[in-house]
Image: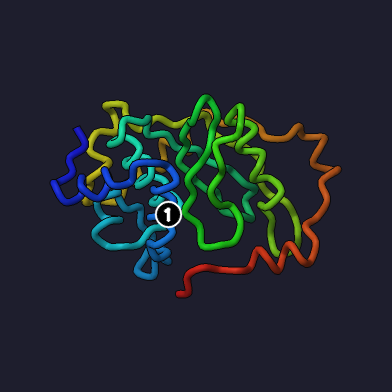
Amino acid sequence: MFGFDKEELKLLRLLRTPRAVQDYLDTVPMNFEQMGDTLLSPRRVMREKKAHCMEGALFAAAAFWVRGREPLLLDLCTTREDDDHVVALFKERGRWGAVSKTNHAVLRWREPIFKSVHALAASYFHEYFLDDGKRTLRAYSRPFDLSTRKFAGWTVAENDLWHLSKALDAARHYSLVPRGNFRHARLADSLEIEAGKITEWKV
C-alpha cells in the first residue's frame, strides 16, 4: 500500500503522533535546492536527509497514513511577490492542527485547537509578510487528500513529484479575507520583520 521497505516503515511507525512527526522534521536540514528545484518523495527525504516545506508536508502526510490517519495537505496561497506554503493537516478530537517544515521562526507547527480549516489557515495570516511589512496570505486550499489512486506511488517515487504540485495548485481554493478588509490590514512592524528573518538552517 505504501511501498516503503522495512527500515523506512520502522522509522515512520516510530512517529506515533503528529508531535513526534514535527519533532523529527525539525531535525531534518532545510533543502535549499542548490542543484535546482526539487520535490522529493518521503522516501527521498529519509534517504537524502533534507526537505523544504512541501517535501516536509509530504513526509508528514506519509507518516500519518502509515499510522492510520488521512494523508492531507493544506496549500497556503500568497500574492505574486511571495511564496506559497504547504503544511500537513491532522485532527485530534475534532480539532485541526498542522505539521509545518520551515526555515523561519514563523509559519510553523499549529496545535490541534482549530474548529475549521479556515480558522487554521487564518492563524498564518498575521505572520505571513514581506520585508516591507506587507501581509501577503490570500487563500487556502480545501484539504488535499493524497490517498486517492490517481496519486499512487507518491510515497516512494524516485522522480520529483511535480504532478502533485500541479494538482495542489489546481485544487479548489478559498479566499481567506474579504477583499475590502485588506485595506484595514496593518503592516508588520520593525520588530516582527526582524523576528521573521531568524533562520534555523544556514546554506
Figure coloring: rainbow
The answer, for residue 69, to whether it is visible in the render is yes
**Does residue 130 lie above or below 198 as drawn?**
above
In the drawing, does residue 156 fall left or right of residue 63?
left
The location of residue 83, given as percent across then percent down, is 56, 53
Residue lying at the far bottom of the rendered structure: 203
Q: Where does residue 190 sit, x and y in percent of width and height?
A: 79, 66
In the displayed structure, would residue 160 be above or below residue 91? Answer: below
Above or below — where is 12 with respect to 116? below
Q: Residue at x 46, y 53 (%)?
A: 53
Say whether residue 171 is visible: no
Q: Toward the viewer: 46 or 7?
A: 7
Q: Residue placed at 13% from the left, 46% from the top?
A: 6
Whole-percent x, y for residue 115 in the image: 61, 27
Name the residue beneath numbered marker 1.
23
Instruction: Give the residue displayed 47% in from the left and 54% down from the top.
Output: 101
Which residue appears at 65% of the width and 48% of the height?
79
Q: Residue furthest left?
A: 6
- Three-letter amino acid code of the residue under disc 1: Asp
Count of marks overlaid on the render: 1
- Residue 39 shown left or right of residue 19 in the figure: left
Q: Tell me which corner region of the image, top left, top right, bottom left or bottom right, holds residue 167.
A: top left
- Residue reaching furthest to the right: 184
Q: Quadrant of the C terminus?
A: bottom left
SS at badge 1 = helix
Left or right: residue 38 versus residue 135 is left
**Which x, y percent locates residue 175?**
66, 32
Neighbours of disc 1 within 10 Å: few (<14), some (14-19), many (20+): some
Q: Quadrant of the N terminus?
A: top left
